[in-house]
Amino acid sequence: MKTRSVFKVLEGEEVMEGAGVKLRRIFGFGDTTLTDPFLLLDNFGSDDPDDYTAGFPWHPHRGIETVTYMLEGVVEHGDSLGNSGVITNGQVQWMTAGSGIIHQEMPQAYDGTMRGFQLWVNLPRSHKMTPPRYRDIKAEDLPSVKGKGWEMKLVCGAYGGAEGPARDIVLKPWFFDVKAEPGAEFALEVRPEDNVLCLVFEGSGSFEKGGKALKPGQLAVLRNGDHVSCAAGARGMRFMLMAGRPLGEPVAWRGPIVMNTEEELVTAFREYRDGTFIKK
């Protein structure tokens, strides 16, 4: 057994996105090799509707998948294919943009603290132009796996005899919500070929023996190994575990579109301007 150690801790920065949404960007638009195949992770949360109700009006995506996980709150969405719906407490939307989609995501005023995440997963060159599709996942459809002092909800990936409902995902990534009891210490088995990222969003805890405790909003990028050592603080810990095999492909990225070459980017934005972005 080789236990992973912490290579780097990311805290991100406060940014304004969409039409005026305040959020914390944990990573994105930087060194993509560090988190490959994951491109961007936004952590949003506020008890002031003015911080988020301006939303994300109509915009395009191509070449990626976006994963929206709502812990609390309500987001209405619609797209150029005629899909529409609502993501609310504990629900997940896994959108494969593929060859191209135009959509909007509009958070609604919420009596409480609206909070959640959006993760961008890169698509390999061979699947950049795959047909777009949605997977809307209800909270009650997320299976749980339990161990001594911990419980884990599975969104995508298999663990402990259970499998998350986001299936047929080309990269077969893991996206797990792990909750640890106060003082719990345990190890999670991971695939040695993956990049593994752990984002703490409740409580505190560490991801290596004797390591410094991470607080909410801090993400650990882990070195190679086949196990992750977890130790929760006095108030417990809750974290997102994201794991995926690196693509190792060139990344050409501008705004909401991610391709492999600058020429492909130019083509995508030209098609968006010309009205030929959506493929039939």
Image (spheres, rainbow, N blue to C red):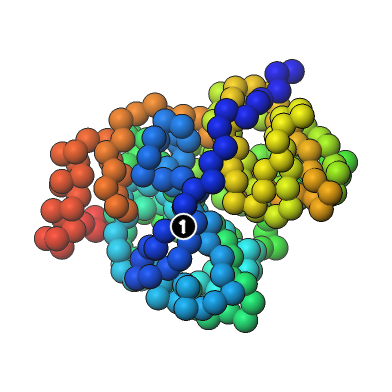
- The quarter of the image holding the C terminus is bottom left
Q: Position of residue 24 (x, y in %)?
A: 49, 56
Tell me which corner region of the image, top left, top right, bottom left or bottom right, holds residue 273: bottom left
User: Which residue appears at 36% of the width and 53% of the height?
Assistant: 97
Would residue 154 be found to the left or right of residue 273 on screen?
Answer: right
Q: Position of residue 179 (x, y in %)?
A: 75, 50
Which structural element holds mark 1?
Answer: strand
Extreme residue toward the top, this view: 1
- Residue at 55% x, 32% y: name it: 8
Which residue is nearer to you in this view: 226 or 20?
Answer: 20
Image position of 277 with respect to 47: above or below? above
Q: Nearer the viewer, residue 99 or 192?
A: 192
Residue 114 vs 178, above or below: the answer is below
> Which of the 4 quarters of the picture holds residue 54?
bottom left
103 to 256, vertically: above or below: below
Q: Position of residue 42 (x, y in %)?
A: 49, 54
Q: Residues within 10 Å of mark 1 (few under 14, many from 20)?
A: some
Front in this rendered view, residue 225 or 232: 232
The quadrant of the picture occupied by the N terminus is: top right
Q: How many marks?
A: 1
User: Is residue 85 at all visible to an observer of this figure?
Assistant: no
Seen in the picture, residue 108 relative to 94 is either above or below; the reply is: below
Query: Residue at coordinates 13% horizontally, 53% vertically from top-left?
Result: 270
List the single residue furthest toward the front. Answer: 212
222 to the left or right of 149: left
Disc 1: which residue? 14
Residue 221 in sight in this render: yes
Q: Position of residue 235 (x, y in %)?
A: 81, 53
Q: Please state which amino acid type lies under the numbered disc 1.
A: Glu
Answer left or right for 40 relative to 8: left
- Seen at 15% across and 46% down, the residue is 266
